[in-house]
Image: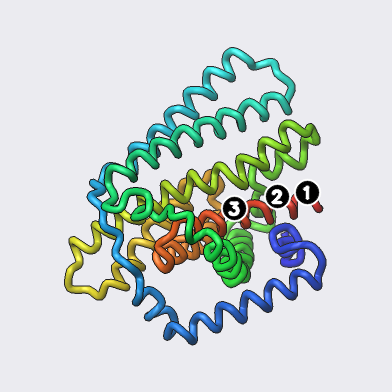
Amino acid sequence: MKICEIVNQFGGYTLIAQVIIYLTGIFLLAFWLLKTSLGRNALADSLPRRNNIPLYLPFIPLFIWFGTVSLALLVKNRLLSRLPDWQNALLDNLIICITAVAVIAVIILLAKNHFTNRLKGFGLNVKTIHKDLLAGLMNLVSVWPLMILMLLLTVYLGQLIWGQDFHIQQHEELKTITTHPQLPLRALIIVTSIVVMPVFEELLFRGLFQTMLRSFFESRIANRESRNRLWLSILASSAIFATMHQTPSHWPALFVLALCLGYAYEKSGSLFRPIFIHSIFNAASIITALYQ
């Protein structure tokens, strides 16, 4: 896959639009680096997030998710193995969507019981939504050139190691939505990808995992500056987030995106900000796939 093909697949639509996005992102990132002393002071004003989350707690909804989806897909494949491909994909996405909604309810219940200020302490305060939407969009634009750079590096290194046949696989949902034109399937994928999964993944990986890791590092590394502990929690939760996805060739770019998501959460104290970033990213990916 050549550079222009990667840019066209992941970077946008027309050349002018791509140039505007990249230049804006580079400017915003450079401004952030200058303003924060290369990121060293970026989290100096991050507020504490008081909680009593035990180390095992984030794994409860994670195991519920994997166990329920795996079991439901197994039963579906045994009972309904002769369905047409698009109906089979529709049921798969319906199972994923319903399970994610159920696990979101579990996470919210856990957050109410383990955060001092309940859902507000967790980062779900509706009063911040109007600020988080614009800030989230700017955060995503600023990190977009870095994600494309990671994709290019992944392809370059992959071709050096595995040969010229190496390429970055398209996400399974994008492949499905472009292969099957049926409206019910496309509508379900759009709702699941843009609404349900960003909420589910941000509540789990940022809200629970990152908070748990932040508390863990704060209790174990008391002699370090607080901002270093915050970055450690962001790095660790970002690694977990990236490796939970099925396509290894996506991991480097997803790790960069996760750093942006984790930083947005720590900087704002609001989960709506990473949710908006995640949702806009998924929407841009779907629009690009359908546009092409």
The image quadrant that residue 276 belongs to is: bottom right
Q: Quadrant of the rendered structure where residue 147 is?
A: bottom right
**Helix, strand or loop status at disc 1:** helix
Query: Marks 1 and 2, how far apart in space?
Result: 6 Å
Residue nearest the observer in this picture, 25 or 251: 25
Amino acid found under the numbered disc labelled 1: Leu
> Is 204 placed left or right of 149 in the picture?
left
Position of residue 140 relative to residue 272, above or below, is: below
Tell me the amino acid under the disc marked 3.
Ser
Q: Mark 2 or mark 3, which is nearer to you?
A: 3
Tell me which residue sits at (49%, 29%) in the image: 69
Q: Which residue sits at x=68%, y=74%?
A: 22
Q: Earlier in the sequence, mark 1 or mark 3?
A: 3
Q: Residues within 10 Å of mark 2 (few under 14, many from 20)?
A: many
Q: Which residue is mark 1?
A: 290
Q: Give the numbered dot on residue 194.
A: none
Residue 268 at x, y percent in the picture = 43, 66
Disc assigned to residue 286: 2
| Residues at discs 2 and 3 in contact (Cβ within 8 Å) | no
Return the residue nearer the eye: 134 or 32.
134
For the residue pair 213 and 5, the one nearer the viewer reads as: 213
List the residue tagged with mark 3.
279
